[in-house]
């Protein structure tokens, strides 16, 4: 039901068009002043609306009501689109016209294509079943007769039915018409995908008495549309989605999309006289009538930007819509892991078991284990139980602060075959980089993302504010990145040297006349992980030590970079530096670095192909303010802004003790030199 401030009043078409042009981000240049006029912080309130305005959540909606802010709104000064008892701004747009341009209609067609290809609809709840699966569950022989004719039921509590000039009698007439007009077809009653409520429909009892199957499971709208040959509805939004897909639609009420000539209407509305096609109605409803807002910060955005956000959130929710057992998660990661692996209606079960058996996985659809802490026997138990295993680790753009300091990450990876830092066996990332195609639009996006990372001076941990020391002599500067010596990326990355001191020795041998600049790993500098190089060996092989210097500053000061398997080598590639690896990190072996090579990695990649795979396609990202899934571009913005949600530390005794020890350790180092 729309939120109503006051009953609308009539305005002239000219006045309406002027007001539309002043308040629709899609119709005007996205300049600062126009964005300020339409900004809504969370939802329309009396502060944002004229007293005559009515508002409703728009046609793009986050799954399961995710987020504090809606993705889209409509604000109407005549009525509201889902009330046929009075004129609405949407109806006036379609009846009067004048807003149509080739560019706008092309955007509409592109938007329709994306939504159909990705299965996006008004309702994107991941708990919805595929229509064919629900049909077979209810009617074992369902679908054997064709075509399937779907009759869409709606809840008796849906007050919108009355506003669309219908009532219980219209549902009964619709069921009778569907059965009599489609002899030999499989007629089934299905609940409105956007408002499924078991046992509350108009048709459930009546259909059962007449022998018409009733699907008692909630179904996904896009699967219903793609699987039926004809659709009957009173006023459900799925009727419009079916019309967009070319399915014949019969309406027994007067929804906003009826009366324009492309639906079979059993009621007529005298105000609607113009002939329209579904693309026209989509353009008017989604591109002109609707307003879109970034759910992360509430700022206005375009339809295309909102659709991109909806795509990311929906894909992650569909991925998480499975019973999940989590293993190997440290206690301080429980909260962030639970949020990361959840979806509407699905919450992971995290176990602290040190050894596992197939019995532990009973009833689970997948197991997610923290790769470096996976309990013994996990892989074998998953194989025996027939449950898919996913290995989870931090991504490559993580936080502002160290993971060892108990700061939750904002990016992660789920890998079904290995993990990216394990060069002893394949991983999903390695397979992706070896076999995937990278279309031009993806490569262009990768280039923009790479430029944004470099411009924003973003790295994995984003720590270090010390100034660069003076370079002690002339010569090419070779940056050597230290690592945590017991880290899994060294143990499994096939290093050709044994530790940080050996790496420094090897680099000095390779570059006798160069300036060797050594940057210790920040975890080691904090005194929290092993890998410290003794002072005498530092003096023998390094000309300068970059204590507390940020990764971007250190890389930009160097002419080349040498690492074992450190991510700093990848960050150096992003910044155009020559990189040598003395091991096989995920970015080595593709022709971009000097490295030992890998027999599995035979493809030669461009830098943007590597970026597309490693930063766009492989990881998952979490927007720190809202907790919603997001794109890498959004997280780069938050890291560049120094978002406080990315600097927070889990409030535990362990975190406090680590912080205190780190302070003491640094003081001891300064005293001892």
Image (tube, grey):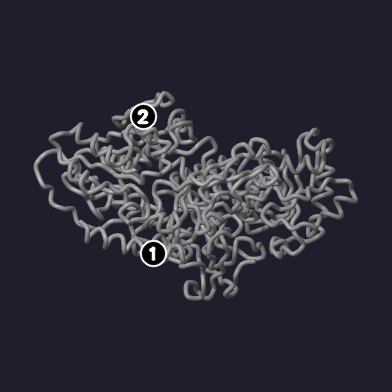
Of all residues, the one furthest to the left in this rendering is 474
Residue highlighted by disc 2: 590
Left or right, 394 with reference to 670? right
- Residue 149 visible within the image: yes
Question: 126 or 389, which lies in front?
Answer: 389
Residue occupying the point 20% across, 32% down: 509
The relative height of residue 2 versus residue 543 in the rendered view (above or below) is below
The quarter of the picture where the C terminus appears is bottom left
Left or right, 305 with reference to 344? left
The relative height of residue 123 versus residue 40 in the rendered view (above or below) is above
Q: Secondary structure at mark 2?
A: loop
- Residue 273 visible within the image: no
Where does the image place residue 128, in percent across and percent down from the top left? 68, 49
The relative height of residue 597 versus residue 576 in the rendered view (above or below) is above
Question: 425 or 657, which lies in front?
Answer: 657
Where does the image place residue 338, in percent across and percent down from the top left? 56, 56
Q: CA distance from mark 2 to mark 1?
A: 37 Å
Where does the image place residue 412, in percent across and percent down from the top left? 47, 48
Question: 126 or 381, which lies in front?
Answer: 381
Residue 417 is labelled as none
Q: Quadrant of residue 538?
A: top left
Q: Secondary structure at mark 1?
A: helix
Residue occupying the point 60% across, 61% down: 81
Residue occupying the point 54% across, 70% down: 53
The disc, 2 or 1, on the residue closer to the chain's N-terminal end is 2
Residue occupying the point 46% across, 40% down: 617
Residue highlighted by disc 1: 644
């Amino acid at each position: 039901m729309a939120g109503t401030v006051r009953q609308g009043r009539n305005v002239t078409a000219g006045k309406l068009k002027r007001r539309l042009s002043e308040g629709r981000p899609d119709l005007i240049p996205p300049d600062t002043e126009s964005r300020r006029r339409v900004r809504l912080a969370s939802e329309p309130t009396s502060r944002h609306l004229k007293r005559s305005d009515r508002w409703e959540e728009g046609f793009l909606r986050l799954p399961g009501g995710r987020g504090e802010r809606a993705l889209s709104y409509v604000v109407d000064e005549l009525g509201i689109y889902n009330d046929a008892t009075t004129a609405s701004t949407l109806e006036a747009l379609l009846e009067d016209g004048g807003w149509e341009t080739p560019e706008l209609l092309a955007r509409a067609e592109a938007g329709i294509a994306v939504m159909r290809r990705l299965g996006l609809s008004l309702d994107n709840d991941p708990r919805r079943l595929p229509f064919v699966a629900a049909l077979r569950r209810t009617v074992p022989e369902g679908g054997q007769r064709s075509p399937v004719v779907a009759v869409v039921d709606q809840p008796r509590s849906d007050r919108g039915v009355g506003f669309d000039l219908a009532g219980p009698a219209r549902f009964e007439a619709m069921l009778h018409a569907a059965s009599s007009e489609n002899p030999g077809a499989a007629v089934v009653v299905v609940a409105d995908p956007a408002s499924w409520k078991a046992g509350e429909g108009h048709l459930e009892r009546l259909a059962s008495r007449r022998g018409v199957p009733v699907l008692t499971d909630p179904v996904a709208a896009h699967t219903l549309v793609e699987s039926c040959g004809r659709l009957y509805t009173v006023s459900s939004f799925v009727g419009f989605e079916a019309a967009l897909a070319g399915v014949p639609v019969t309406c027994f009420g007067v929804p906003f999309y009826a009366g324009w000539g492309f639906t079979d209407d059993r009621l007529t509305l005298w105000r609607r006289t113009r002939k329209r096609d579904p693309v026209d109605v989509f353009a008017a409803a989604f591109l002109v009538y609707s307003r879109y807002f970034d759910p992360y910060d509430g700022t206005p955005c375009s339809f295309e930007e909102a659709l991109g956000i909806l795509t990311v959130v929906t894909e992650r929710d569909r991925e998480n819509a499975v019973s999940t057992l989590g293993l190997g998660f440290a206690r301080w990661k429980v909260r962030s892991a639970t949020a990361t692996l959840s979806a509407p209606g699905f919450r992971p079960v995290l176990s602290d078991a040190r050894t596992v058996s197939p019995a532990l996985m009973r009833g689970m659809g997948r197991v997610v284990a923290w790769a470096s802490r996976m309990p013994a026997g996990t892989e074998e138990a998953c194989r025996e139980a027939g449950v898919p295993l996913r290995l989870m680790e931090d991504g490559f753009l993580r936080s502002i602060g160290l993971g060892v300091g108990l700061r939750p990450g904002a990016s992660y990876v789920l890998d079904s075959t290995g993990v990216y830092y394990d060069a002893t066996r394949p991983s999903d990332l390695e397979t992706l980089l070896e076999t995937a195609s990278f279309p031009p639009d993806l490569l262009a996006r990768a280039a923009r993302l790479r430029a944004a990372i470099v411009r924003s001076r973003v790295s994995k941990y984003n720590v270090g504010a010390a100034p660069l020391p003076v370079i002690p002599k002339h010569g090419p500067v070779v940056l050597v990145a230290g690592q945590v010596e017991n880290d899994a990326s060294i143990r499994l990355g096939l290093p050709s040297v044994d530790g940080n001191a050996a790496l420094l020795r090897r680099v000095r041998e390779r570059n006798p006349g160069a300036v060797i600049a050594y940057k210790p790993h920040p975890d080691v500098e904090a005194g929290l992980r092993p890998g410290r190089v003794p002072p005498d060996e530092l003096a023998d092989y390094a000309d300068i030590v970059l204590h507390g210097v940020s990764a971007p500053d250190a890389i930009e000061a160097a002419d080349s970079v040498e690492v074992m398997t450190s991510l700093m080598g990848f960050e150096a590639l992003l910044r155009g530096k020559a990189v040598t690896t003395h091991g096989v990190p995920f970015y080595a072996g593709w022709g971009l670095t000097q490295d030992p090579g890998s027999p599995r990695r035979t493809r030669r990649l461009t830098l943007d192909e590597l970026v597309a795979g490693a930063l766009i396609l492989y990881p998952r990202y979490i927007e720190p303010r809202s907790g919603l899934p997001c794109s890498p571009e959004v997280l780069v913005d938050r890291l560049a802004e120094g978002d406080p949600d990315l600097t927070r530390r889990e409030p535990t005794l362990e975190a406090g003790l680590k912080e205190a020890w780190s302070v003491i350790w640094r003081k001891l180092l300064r005293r001892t030199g």
